[in-house]
Image (cartoon, rainbow, N blue to C red):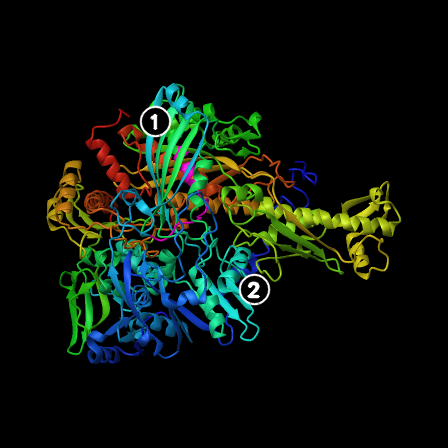
């Protein structure tokens, strides 16, 4: 085996898993889809003493629309979300975004909730969670709580989830009826993490002006970013060139991207503005058609 | 020199020249192939390698105590013991004045690149070996590293080897014609500085080795994921102090090589040495992250080039300084590869003068060596970028400039200014066929219209020639090779009439079981299905020089063909005896797919090949001067190289706002001489194009200034997938090689060689009117965007 030694537990209930987590706390890691954790184990970059494999908690493998939310259980694979008719019908922006996650083989194993609590800021799922003002439901020794996305992400690969808490569900509020949407990404290769990704959600009034617009960005800093000033600039506006130019500037101001071997910070900042404009146009186009795909 | 055997015609035969089902596929696509890692031998131990985390450091001490005491660990070897186990790593090429510092499979007292092997641990399981390797404590005192070859050549640079001044391993000059005269006559001088970036080969199967020494006899069998079992057989016994008659090397199914398995690696030597020492089999399988740092890299040249050009676009001469970053030490052919570039630098053009100096420079990086194309892609990139730049600076069309400089079809054999003799070619013919497919004028109109709308379209061309059929042994030796260039083949017919071919080539994806079967089936008149091809095992195929440099068809295939003919001639003599006719009166013919011999003018008086084979084995009625048995062996040494060529075009759209490059069309017309199997050729071209496009747009090794490798996984090293590539449009012209009787040239590397400059030329064509003259590869979006921004800022460019 390539990974360092670890103790392995495979609980069959949430209570059992939470008990294991509270016993082992920081020494433990939760294994769900394993698409990030297992490579890190094999490269010996992660060295948990204990693995809590939740794949046998069958009750966590679900998707349902309830109380104005799409609730995605912690064992719902990316592929399940991608293929679900209710996602296509009710949260199409999530379906579009999930297609950008890795390749089919990765999506067959990886989970949406796992991707979110892994908190890679270049990943697509956290950006969609932010776009929809979603939250993650966690269970700990003292009970269940929902962590809104704003309180969840701290910085690169870091969340406010306690070491004794298990994320059991991701909750995506359904977009308003008739909202247009778009998800756009620049990546080195098909299936790579985003250099920059932008998700947009737009509702339009009868005259074709923006009622409400939301933008969410990945790959532009330590967490997903909602550029509030850019969103505010859009309210009541038609998507004319000068408006979009001002929005692009506001987007670029709202982010602190870093340079790496794939792209400079300058490039990411620029492209964030470009993609924001394109995503808004595409979302508005859909909004005008009544929010249909 | 006259060929001993008449050339085969160019048109397809019954089997030869046609698409047949690949014999390799059923086992490979059903997961029943046998790779090195599939080997599980009783009592097998597992080896793990402790590698340097530093680019350059002195080893202050190694504590193996904890590792040795761990459960399952059987041995730990460091640089202190390595000299007792084996000799230093051989360098298989010599150059005048070459500095070749002594390098053992483990670092002795200093490490010189990230990933250099420092110690090995052998244990009862892979996990125990990995845990043991982690427990080896190595003390390092970091030294300043040098990663930029131009800086490495400066006085005062850190030295990779203390006794190699300015880190210069070799200088290799090559010139021909009167270069001073060319520049005197020039109307214009066009200059470029090009970086041909460092690449990682990344075959699907990483390297791996299993060594099994017999504890009593000391015989050693070594299975390796290698392209060169025979060359390993020539090298390893001496290094391990075992008679070569007691060493057997096996290359089982090998999942790709691209040149990186044309080498002798530390792990192969160490696994062999440790198996001999411990008397148990030892296995080592390369991890993907090890591949990025411990398997050779490719390319890595900086080219300073200038062309003397006449006003009408004729290239009168090229002067170039090639700085090759060869990494920390020599692997098997490290010194050779950069020297192939100047030989091919006049390409498809009649360039009268050339003056090149190659400078090979040590740096604190993984050694470079052969990678698909090995020196020729670098030459083609340099030349094809140069020709496009000449056209642009003179305001001429790049197609027209190529035409004006081409070697003409009636000039073959053509002696190049670099001293080679091109066998055959029709470069303009390939270009014309290409142009028929792309509607060039229509594209130029479309490009203008697109620019009015702010869209950036570009077209790039690449017309290339490369060198294959390695190699005439005398020339190979004169160039510096430590080995010959011939190939061997044995063809035998069993008493029941089935055919076995033993080849000295060592396929690792090329499909020799298929193509050699086609040659033999055609020549002997037997069923394609009734031919077995054996390869890659020195106990079965004792003589050969393996597979690399697109040599196998032209040299190995020819040997197979000649052995078939030789065997057929023996059969004819037996047939004549049986038919009571003179040999000259007996003819060979294939009737209903079956080879048979008949008396001239009396086809009813015949015997089949199978009947002759049976007669040869019963030996009841053979001529006095004919030995029993049906077997023929040929060693074929070619008289010249072969020179495949082609013309490629690429159409791209560049997004002006995010710098993304999208390939809209890629059209390749290649000429590899006669074709043994069109499908295999197509496969080679597709894979080659993918790899060449990968260099242009995606791949590139990145080290930081301290020599840390930043692209050490497939996450960061961007090998493209099918989803990132266009659908290729391919076609051929056929210009047979007069060098061998099959008329074949080779096609293993052509796609890679032609495509890289083609894509870059297309991107520059899309951006040139903005003032962009050149962008170094890979043309990732951020670089393309930055080049556009820079051109805009400096106010360059012309109106659309």
**Which quarter of the rendered picture does the C terminus of chain B lie within?**
top left
User: Going by the image, does B124 lie left or right of B633?
Assistant: left
* Residue B4 in view (yes/no): yes
Q: Is residue B378 magenta?
A: yes
Q: Quadrant of residue B746?
A: top right
Front of the two marks 1 and 2: 2
**Label 2 Cα crowd, 10 Å radius (few <14 / some 14-19 / many 20+):** few
Say which residue label 2 marks: B243
Q: Secondary structure at mark 1?
A: strand
Relative to B451, residue A187 above or below? below
Kindly identify which numbered label has been placed on residue B190: 1
Q: Nearer the viewer, residue A109 or B2?
A: B2
Relative to A123, residue B68 above or below? below
Determine the chain carrying the residue at label 2.
Answer: B
Q: Nearer the viewer, residue B439 or B277?
A: B277
Q: Position of residue A128 (x, y in %)?
A: 23, 56
Q: Position of residue B15 (x, y in %)?
A: 66, 47
Q: Secondary structure at mark 2?
A: loop
């Amino acid at each position: 085996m390539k990974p360092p030694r670890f103790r392995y537990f495979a609980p069959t209930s949430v209570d059992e898993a939470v008990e294991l987590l509270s016993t082992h706390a920081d020494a433990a890691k939760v294994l769900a889809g394993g698409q990030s954790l297992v490579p890190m184990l094999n490269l010996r970059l992660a060295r948990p003493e204990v693995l809590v494999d939740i794949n046998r908690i069958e009750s966590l493998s679900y998707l349902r629309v309830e109380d104005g939310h799409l609730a995605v259980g912690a064992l719902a694979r990316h592929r399940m979300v991608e293929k679900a008719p209710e996602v296509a019908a009710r949260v199409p922006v999530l379906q579009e975004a999930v297609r950008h996650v890795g390749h089919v083989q990765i999506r067959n194993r990886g989970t949406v909730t796992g991707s979110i609590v892994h908190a890679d800021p270049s990943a697509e799922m956290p950006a969609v969670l932010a776009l929809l003002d979603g939250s993650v439901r966690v269970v700990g020794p003292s009970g269940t709580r929902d962590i809104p996305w704003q309180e969840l992400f701290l910085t690169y690969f870091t969340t406010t989830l306690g070491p004794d808490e298990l994320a059991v569900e991701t909750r995506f509020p359904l977009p308003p009826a008739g909202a247009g949407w778009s998800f756009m990404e620049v990546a080195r290769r098909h299936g790579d993490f985003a250099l920059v990704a932008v998700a947009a959600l737009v509702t339009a009034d009868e005259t074709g002006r923006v009622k409400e617009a939301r933008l969410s960005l990945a790959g532009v800093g330590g967490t997903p970013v909602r550029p509030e000033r850019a969103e505010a600039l859009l309210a009541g506006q038609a998507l004319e060139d000068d408006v979009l130019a001002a929005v692009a500037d506001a987007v670029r101001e709202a982010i602190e991207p870093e340079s790496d071997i794939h792209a400079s910070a300058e490039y990411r900042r620029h492209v964030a503005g470009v993609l924001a404009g394109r995503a808004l146009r595409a979302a508005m186009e859909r909004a005008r058609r009544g929010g249909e795909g | 020199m006259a060929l001993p055997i008449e050339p085969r015609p160019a048109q397809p035969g019954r089997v030869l020249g046609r698409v047949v089902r690949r014999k390799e596929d059923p086992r490979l696509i059903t997961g029943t192939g046998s790779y090195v890692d599939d080997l599980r031998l009783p009592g097998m131990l597992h080896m793990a390698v402790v590698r340097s985390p530093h680019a350059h450091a002195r080893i202050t001490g190694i504590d193996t105590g904890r590792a040795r005491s761990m459960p399952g660990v059987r041995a730990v070897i460091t640089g202190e013991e390595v000299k007792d186990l084996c000799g230093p790593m051989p360098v298989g090429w010599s150059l005048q004045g070459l500095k070749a510092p002594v390098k053992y499979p483990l670092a002795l007292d200093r490490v010189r690149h990230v990933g250099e092997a420092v110690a090995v641990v052998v244990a009862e399981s892979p996990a125990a070996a990995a845990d043991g390797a982690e427990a080896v404590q190595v003390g390092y005192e970091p030294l300043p590293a040098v990663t930029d070859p131009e800086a490495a050549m400066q006085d005062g640079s850190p030295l990779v080897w203390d006794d190699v001044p300015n880190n210069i391993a070799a200088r290799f000059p090559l010139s021909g014609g009167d270069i001073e005269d060319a520049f005197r006559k020039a109307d214009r001088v066009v200059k470029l500085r090009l970086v041909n970036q460092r690449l990682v080969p990344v075959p699907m199967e990483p390297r791996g080795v299993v060594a099994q020494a017999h504890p009593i006899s000391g015989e050693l069998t070594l299975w390796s994921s290698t392209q060169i079992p025979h060359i390993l057989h020539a090298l390893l016994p001496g290094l391990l102090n075992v008679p070569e008659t007691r060493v057997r090397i096996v290359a089982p199914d090998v999942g790709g090589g691209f040149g990186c398995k044309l080498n002798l690696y530390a792990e192969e030597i160490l696994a062999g040495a440790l198996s001999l020492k411990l008397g148990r089999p030892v296995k080592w399988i390369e991890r993907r992250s090890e591949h990025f740092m411990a398997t050779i890299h490719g390319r890595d040249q900086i080219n300073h080039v200038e062309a003397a050009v006449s006003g009408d676009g004729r290239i009168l001469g090229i002067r170039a300084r090639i700085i090759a970053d060869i990494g920390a030490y020599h692997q098997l052919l490290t010194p050779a590869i950069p020297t192939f570039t100047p030989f091919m630098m006049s390409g498809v053009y009649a360039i009268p003068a050339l003056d090149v100096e190659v400078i090979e420079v040590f740096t604190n990086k993984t050694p470079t060596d052969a990678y698909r194309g090995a020196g020729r892609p670098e030459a083609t990139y340099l030349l094809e970028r140069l020709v496009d730049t000449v056209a642009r600076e003179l305001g001429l069309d790049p197609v027209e400039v190529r035409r004006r400089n081409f070697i003409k079809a009636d000039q073959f054999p053509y002696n190049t200014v670099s001293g080679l003799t091109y066998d055959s070619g029709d470069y303009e013919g390939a270009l014309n066929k290409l142009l028929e497919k792309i509607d060039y004028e229509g594209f130029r109109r479309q490009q203008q219209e697109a620019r009015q709308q702010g869209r950036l379209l570009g077209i790039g061309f690449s017309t290339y020639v490369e060198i294959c059929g390695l190699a005439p042994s005398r020339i190979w030796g004169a160039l510096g090779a430590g080995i010959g260039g011939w190939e061997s083949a044995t063809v035998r017919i069993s008493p029941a009439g089935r055919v076995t071919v033993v080849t000295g080539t060592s396929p690792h994806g090329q499909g020799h079981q298929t193509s050699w079967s086609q040659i033999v089936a055609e020549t002997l008149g037997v069923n394609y299905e009734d031919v077995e091809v054996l390869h890659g095992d020195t106990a079965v195929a004792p003589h050969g020089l393996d597979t690399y440099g697109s040599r196998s068809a032209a040299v190995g295939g020819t040997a197979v063909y000649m052995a078939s003919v030789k065997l057929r001639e023996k059969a004819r003599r037996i047939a004549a005896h049986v038919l009571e006719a003179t040999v000259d009166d007996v003819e060979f013919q294939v009737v209903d797919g079956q080879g048979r011999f008949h008396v001239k003018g009396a086809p009813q008086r015949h015997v089949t090949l199978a009947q002759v084979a049976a007669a040869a084995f019963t030996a009841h009625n053979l001529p006095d001067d004919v030995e029993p048995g049906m077997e023929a062996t040929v060693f074929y040494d070619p008289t010249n190289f072969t020179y495949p060529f082609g013309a490629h075009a690429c159409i791209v759209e560049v997004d002006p706002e995010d710098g993304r490059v999208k390939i809209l069309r890629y059209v390749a017309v290649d000429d590899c001489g006669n074709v043994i199997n069109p499908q295999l050729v197509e496969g080679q071209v597709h894979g080659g194009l993918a790899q060449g496009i990968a260099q242009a747009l995606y791949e590139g090794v990145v080290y930081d200034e301290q020599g840390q490798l930043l692209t050490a996984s497939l996450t960061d090293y961007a090998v493209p997938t099918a989803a990132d590539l266009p659908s290729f449009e391919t076609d051929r012209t056929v210009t047979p090689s007069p060098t061998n009787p099959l008329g074949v040239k080779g096609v293993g590397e052509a796609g890679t060689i032609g495509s890289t400059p083609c894509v870059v030329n297309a991107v520059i064509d899309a951006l040139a009117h903005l003032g962009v003259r050149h962008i170094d590869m890979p043309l990732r979006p951020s670089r393309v965007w930055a080049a556009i921004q820079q051109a805009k800022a400096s106010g360059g460019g012309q109106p659309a």
